[in-house]
Image (tube, rainbow, N blue to C red):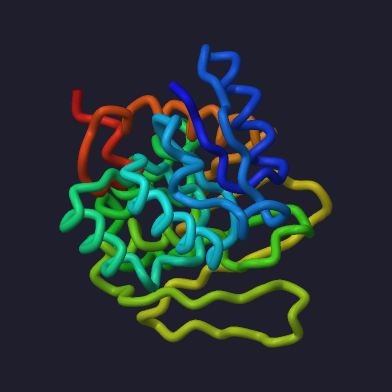
Amino acid sequence: MKIVLLGYGKMGQLIERFAMKRGHEVVLIVDERNRDSISSEDLEDADIAIDFSTPHAALENISLCFESNLPLVVGTTGWYDHLDEVKATCLEAEQSLLYGSNFSIGVNIFFHINKLLAKAINPYKQYDVQVEEIHHIHKLDAPSGTAITIAEGILENNEDKSAWVNSVEGSGEEVIPKANELLIESLRIEEVPGTHTVLYSSEVDQIEFKHTAHSREGFALGAVIAAEWLFGKKGFYQVTEMFDFNN
């Protein structure tokens, strides 16, 4: 495939490396240095685009790719308030977009088991649940998109929780969740790539379910695999649709 990279930070550079390893070609890199000069004509020779930019830039990049009839994988988070309108535009214009908060194979297995665990524990009201996420100090948004996806998986399968709330350690603002609220606790520590933990606690024991990323490489490889999966398809997809855990 001929790939356009939208965003060329640490993730973009890793994606380029894995794409080349898997026999693909990066034909264009778009970032803050050249974004204003890029038009749909510049994307004509590409097969697919992968976006790891910023929330505002991602929305502009989605529009650009739709104009260019270019399939797009979006790993950027923070734009999901516009999800419904982007989906409607994508389907109406018969375009192709796949999005997700995390493309790591291991994390997507985690997402799946997280839902099964929440469903299994739901009848046992003695357990209270919370989510903890740890990332490097350069990550400005909190909670992480991955933590939100985990929380949403729990909320779908827990009758007692109806919303999540976020507490950022060191922010000086203490967040005390209500009984119906799921707490996501965010910590920012040095160069941690990403650790996510679901904790179920009762008076007699605690169940911990954890995923620890050793590097960003799993995310980058997953994004390239997502592009391979989307290539040749039309429609609006979540990354979880790449995986079939029932077979």
Which residue does the image show at 39% across and 43% down from the upper left?
Answer: 72
Left or right side of 168 for 61: left
In this view, 69 is above or below 174:
above
Which residue does the image show at 39% across and 73% down from the upper left?
Answer: 81
User: Considering the image in quadrants, where does the C terminus appear?
Assistant: top left
Q: Quadrant of residue 109?
A: top left
Q: Nearer the viewer, residue 215 or 156?
A: 215
Left or right side of 181 for 33: right
On the image, the x and y values in percent for residue 188 come to: 74, 61
User: Considering the image in quadrants, where does the N terminus appear?
Assistant: top left
Q: Nearer the viewer, residue 159 or 152?
A: 152
On the image, the x and y values in percent for residue 99 come to: 38, 49
On the image, the x and y values in percent for residue 77 come to: 50, 59
Counting labels gives 0
Q: Can residue 19 be seen in this view?
A: yes
Which residue does the image show at 42% across and 42% down from the upper left?
Answer: 73
Outermost front residue? 41
In this view, 85 is above or below 217:
below
On the image, the x and y values in percent for residue 123 come to: 23, 61
In this view, 140 is above or below 48:
below
Q: Is residue 202 visible?
A: no
Q: Quadrant of residue 20?
A: top right
Q: Which of 50 and 44 is in front in this view?
A: 44
Q: Nearer the viewer, residue 37 or 26?
A: 37
